[in-house]
Amino acid sequence: MSIRKIINDPIYGLISFPFEEIYTLIEHPYFQRLRRISQMGLSTYVYPSATHTRFSHALGAVHLMCKAIDTLRIKGVEISDEEYLAVCQAILLHDIGHGPFSHGLEGLIYPKHHEEISLDIMTELNKELDGALSLAITIFKNDYSKSFLHQLVSSQLDMDRLDYLTRDSFHTGVAEGVIGYDRLISMMQVKDDELVIEEKAIFSIEKFLVARHIMYWQVYLHKTSIVAERMLKEFVLRLTDLIKDNKLASRANSGLVPFLQARLSGTINDDYYLEAFTSLDDVDVLSSVKESINHPDPVLSYLSTSILNRRLHKLFLSDDPIPSDLIEEKRQNAVAVLKQHFPTHNNLEKLVQKLIFTGQESNQAYNNTRQTIRVLQKDGVVTPLSEVLETLINVKKITKHYLCYPK
C-alpha cells in the first residue's frame, strides 16, 4: 500500500515527494526528533513567530530539490531515478545531526559538528536499511562523479539556503529576506559537471546575496538573539562544571543532565553516542532550565531564571575588541546585581566572572574564494560571479565583538 502523503506547507502550499523511500525516512524516530529541534534557536525571543523546526525546513528543502531536479531533467541533464532519489535523501537528512536549539548549542552538548553527526546518523540508517542510503552518503560527502548533485545539497546556492532564507523570512516577518527561489531554480543548468546559473538570473542572485546579508545581521545575529543564546550556552557550561564537581545529581534515566554525566564519565564517546544523542531535543534543555531556577548555585539559578523569564543581559557591540576597563566596570556592576538577588552568598566576587561574557560573531554573505557561484553566459562561457556583478555584497568577512553583562 502506498504511504505517499500530501503535506500542507505554509510557504509552498500542498507538496508531495515522488519516492516512498522519502516517507519511510520521515517516519523514522531519528527524523521525527527534528520536530522538537527549533530551526532558529532562541530567535523567538526577538521574533515571536519564529517557532518553526528543523523538521519543516528539511521537508521544504526536499521540495525545492525535486523542483531543481525536474528543471535540470527538462533541460536535458541526465539524472537517473536512482540519483534523483539519492539526492533527495541527502538533502532530507542534511540537518538530522543538529542538537537541541540547533546552532545555539552547536558542539557544546557533544563535541562534534552537526554535519559530522548527520553523516554518522546517515551511516547508521544505511545499516538499518540494508544499504539504501549508500549513494546518498556518497553524494553528501561529495565523492560522487556528478559533483553538481552535491552542489545542490551543499554550496553557496543550494536547496538548504534557498529554503531556510525563504522559511525564516516568512516566520520572522522580515520581508527583506524574501528571495526569488523559483526564479533561481528555473535558471539552473549544468555545464562540465558543474552547477551554474544562467545569465538571465544575475539580478535574482544579487537579491539572494542581499537578502542573506540582511537576514544575518537583522535576524540570525540580532543583538537579543546573540545574548539569549550565549546565556543558554553559559547555562549548559555551568551545568557541566557542577557535574564535574559532583554538585549536580539527577535521578532521571534520560535528559540533559544524565547525558552530560555519561559523557563526562566516558560512558558516551565516539563509539557509542548516537542512541543517547538522538534522544535529546529542546524539551530536555528547557526542562533542565526550569529545574534549575531554585538551585543553590547562584550562577545556575540566575541564568535559568533569566532565560525562562526573558530577563536578558545587556549587550555592547563593537567593531573592535572590547577594552579591559569596560569589562571591569561591568564586572563591578554585576557584583551589585548579584548581591540584590543573593544577599547572603559570600563568594559573589568570584562567581560573577561566570556572568560576564565576551565573544565575537562573523558573517560573510558570499565567499568568492570557495566554490564560487558560476554564471553561464549567453555565448556558453562560464564566468565566476565576481566577474559578472559590478559590486558583490559582503565579500569581506565582517566581525563584531561583543560584551554581555547583567542589567
Image (cartoon, rainbow, N blue to C red):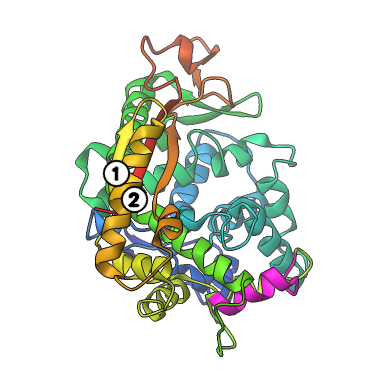
Q: Is residue 90 left or right of residue 304?
A: right
Q: Is residue 311 left or right of residue 346?
A: left
Q: How busy is the neighbourhood of tag 2: few (under 14 within 10 Å), some, or many (20 plus)? A: many
* Element assignment for label 2: helix
Instruction: Find the magenta span and give its range.
Output: 257-269
Whole-percent x and y of residue 102?
47, 57
- Picture residue at 64% right of the left edge, 75% below the top: 261
Q: Quadrant of residue 190?
A: top right
Whole-percent x and y of residue 182?
35, 40
- Picture residue at 59% right of the left edge, 35% below the top: 77
Pointers 1 and 2 in contact (C-beta within 8 Å): yes
Height in image: 249 above or below 172?
below
Q: What is the quadrant of the N terminus in the image?
A: bottom right
Residue assigned mark 2: 227
Which mark is on residue 109? none
Q: Is residue 262 magenta?
A: yes
Residue 26 in view in this figure: no
Whole-percent x and y of residue 236?
49, 64
Residue 109 in view in this figure: yes
Q: Earlier in the sequence, mark 1 or mark 2?
A: 2
Amino acid of disc 2: Val
Amino acid of disc 1: Leu
Residue assigned mark 1: 315
Q: Is residue 233 magenta?
A: no
Q: Quadrant of residue 301?
A: bottom left
Q: Is residue 27 left or right of residue 310?
A: right
Q: CA distance from mark 1 to mark 2?
A: 7 Å
